[in-house]
Amino acid sequence: MGPGSDTALRHVERALADSERRLSAVVDLAPLVLFACDAAGTITLLRGAGLQALRVDAGTLIGTNVFALLDDSGRHDVSTLLERALQGEETHGVMRFGDTVFEGSFRPQRASSGAIAGVIAVYHDVTLAHRSQEQVRHMAYHDPLTGLPNRARLEERLAEGLARGRRTGRALALLYIDLDEFKLVNDSLGHAAGDELLCEVAQRLDATTRACDLLARHGGDEFMLLVEDLEPDDEHAVEAVAANVLAALAPPFTVDGAEFQVGASIGVSVWPRHGREPAELLQHADAALYQAKAQGRGVHAIYDPRTGSSRGRLTLTARLRRALEQDEFELHYQPIYGLAGGEQLAMEALVRWRDPERGLVLPGDFIGVAEGSGLIDDLGTWVLEEACRQMRAWIDAGLEPYVSVNVAPRQLRDAWFARRVAHTLDRFGLEPNRLMIEVTESAAMLEPQRTDPLLREVGELGVRLGIDDFGTGHSSLARLQALPFEALKIDRSFLRGVPEGRNETRMLSAVLALAGALGMSVVAEGIETDAQRAFLAGAGCQYGQGFLLGRPVPAGEIAATMRR
Ligand code: C2E
Ligand code: MG
Ligand code: MG
């Protein structure tokens, strides 16, 4: 061979070396672990960027025995896969090393004789995919606000708990916890404060929960506590848990700088006494909650099959929906009087639920739930229509009604609200000024970009606007003046210390002066005593409403006072 072919050979060698270096670089960059061993388990290849996560020095491991290595590090899971591969089976697996997750397979290699010569393996790093899968799983099973397990997780755990109970013969209790005054905070301080309160409640509840029990957020202001491993007939243990929960929520909460008392009601059902299946236990805990609420607030009730069977099937939301369908709501009317002349000028329509089981239920017990569940949209529409229908009937009977209707914050998020109002007035042939829409101060001040145009639209119809429960929220004076509010209703909490309390009377006078400066008329709510009425009249408050002047009564009764 001449010098020419020598050069050619060197060329080929260099090209091969280059190619191998490139391949090597690629292999060492790939998030893989490449492995090979012979039939005895001697490592012949160990490469790939995935090795960094294993914290091994591949160079020193070549030629050592892989089984010894795995035994030393206690990875019997991996040796098993490898052994099976050495017996001729292709094995797949997921391996965790610390936070890193690998997925791949061991593949047997055969010599030309057919005998197994060794095993090769390719594992890739799937940590990221795993992490996002876990995130998705976490999201599917947790409430984003409080971080607590959600309803789906609760139902799963309940099923697991029942299976455990069947094996061990131990009982299990489900506590359905519902906050009593949540709506008040949400309405007066806004949703951000409401969220903050829910998180604090979740923390307090969590602190009372044993590690083996499950606390979940069931939605809105409802929580569920699953308590396992109870003595089957030990009612006291269940009572103690419920009492603990109520005690944990008793001290006031501080939200947005203000202190709140947030009590709770609890309904309890016990497995196996109150049902054998998860759905049944959930229904019965809900029925018990209803029983607890009927006894007053801050109470727990254990499911009682004698009273629960007939109505235990429906949640409060479902019962309200049915109530709407079956026409169980009615409006009562409370008169509003001129304080100087003593004449009845208008009235406020207040909704009530004629529950066939409980009798007359006041809005404080269901408006919050109706708002939370969205039912308020339909209920609010019903209230408006019913008030307008009633006004038409009164006008036809020769009376001169002016009626205020309360509108919930959620209704103000409906871009069609003003058009609905206009349509309803039209349908009953009513002049718009017969209707006043009352919006609570906190609702009016929420979300100005959305609320302001809507309120202006209502004002342009000629419908009057009143700001309700004034003094319980935070108002922007600039917006109060810019919006077409005609009347301001002072919340009845302001009347509590009047006329004896110096601070209260001073506050009241200040509000009256403010309303005067803004050109708004004032209605004082909750006048219960003559002294209060006299003080208000003397302080220049034009209108008043309260038990002293007239309680809310059915339409038939108020008509009589209108005539007088
Ligand atoms: P509100 O609009 O401030 O209504 C006045 C509430 O104060 C009524 O309670 C009324 O019965 C009560 N009240 C009036 N005078 C006195 C008094 O002298 N002393 C005392 N202690 N209370 C007095 P009610 O009917 O239980 O309604 C409570 C709240 O429920 C209402 O407060 C209003 O915010 C809401 N609400 C009532 N009806 C509706 C409705 O149709 N839709 C909406 N969204 N909310 C309603
Ligand atoms: Mg009102
Ligand atoms: Mg009010």
Image (cartoon, grey):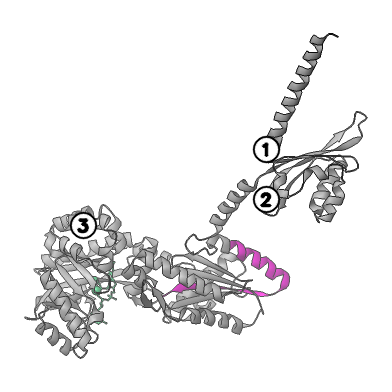
Residue 27: give x, y in percent of width and height.
71, 35
Disc 2 is placed on an element classified as strand
Total marks shown come to 3
Contact, CB < 8 Å: mark 1 with mark 3?
no
Identify the magenta region: 155-181
State the residue at coordinates (14%, 66%).
Answer: 486
Residue 223 on image: x %, y % = 50, 69
Q: CA distance from mark 2 to mark 1?
A: 15 Å
Q: Which residue is mark 2?
A: 100
525 in magenta: no
Residue identified by numbered label 3: 421
Check residue 159 for magenta coloring: yes
Residue 210 in sight here: yes
Q: Percent from the top left, x then y, of residue 337?
A: 13, 78
Asked whether mark 3 and ligand 1 are closer than 8 Å, the reply comes as no
Three-letter code for the amino acid on which mark 3 is drawn: Val
Question: Which three-letter amino acid code belongs to the residue tagged 1?
Answer: Ala
Asked where in the image residue 537 lies, by quadrant, the reply is bottom left
Q: Residue at coordinates 53% horizontally, 62% vertically from top-left?
A: 151
Name the residue carrying label 1. Answer: 30
Q: Position of residue 214 (x, y in %)?
A: 59, 69
